[in-house]
Image (tube, rainbow, N blue to C red):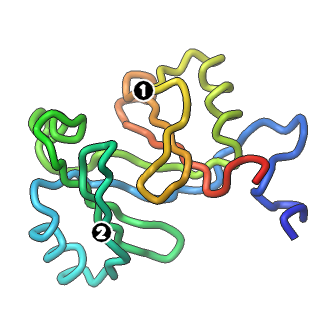
Amino acid sequence: MDNLPGSNSRRDVGRPARVLRVAHVAVVVEDIESALTFWRDVLGIPLSRVDRASDQESTVAFLRLEGAQVELVQPTSDNSGVARYLQKRGPGMHHVCLEVDDLEGMLDRLKQAGVRLTQEQPIVGPSGQKIAFLHPESTYGVLIELYQERPHGS
């Protein structure tokens, strides 16, 4: 079934990588438990799980909506990128995550277009998927995360 038209398990030869959907919005917070009282308890968005993202020095709470998620991100170190963001800008919108069908292909396309990446190669995200970030200087002020649900060719 993975080879049916429209399947995102691998892209068509010759077709450029494409964005499939908004996967989540991430909100940086000082205290996840406090933030959950609003997002989960007041708004009623169900909490899926809370994960520690050691490589990104943060804790992430995943709140599931139909077709997307809200992620609450709390730094676990004063030296992490998320901590610096929080210190500079305060709590609030951190990034928008877009699912793509071919992350490596999309990164190649973006590099050719002169888009500034925060890393040249994808990294493994907190849920085991491949991710990469685009620098806000190239995206009109918005930090963008790209991710691929199922890596190309798997």
Kind of residue at badge 2? Val
Q: Quadrant of residue 81?
A: top left
- The residue depicted at 60 percent of the width and 20 percent of the height is 111
- The residue depicted at 90 percent of the width and 65 percent of the height is 4
Q: Quadrant of residue 135?
A: top left
Q: In the picture, which quadrant includes the N terminus?
A: bottom right
Which secondary structure lies at badge 2? strand
Query: What residue would you read off at disc 1?
Result: 118
- The residue depicted at 46 percent of the width and 43 percent of the height is 145
In screen coordinates, is 131 left or right of 153? left
Kind of residue at badge 1? Thr
Q: Nearer the viewer, residue 14 or 10?
A: 10
Q: In the picture, which quadrant includes the C terminus?
A: bottom right
Structural distance between the alpha carbons of marks 1 and 2: 25 Å
The answer to whether the residues at label 1 and label 2 have Cβ atoms under 8 Å apart is no
- The residue depicted at 38 percent of the width and 56 percent of the height is 25
In screen coordinates, is 84 left or right of 115? left
Q: Position of residue 103 (x, y in %)?
A: 64, 40
Q: Position of residue 138 (x, y in %)?
A: 45, 23
In this rendering, the answer to whether 33 lies above or below 94 is below
Q: Residue 81 has which mark? A: none
In this rendering, the answer to whether 117 lies above or below 58 is above
Q: Residue 50 has which mark? A: 2
Which secondary structure lies at badge 1? loop
Within 10 Å of disc 1 (Cα), the crowding (few <14, some 14-19, many 20+) is: some
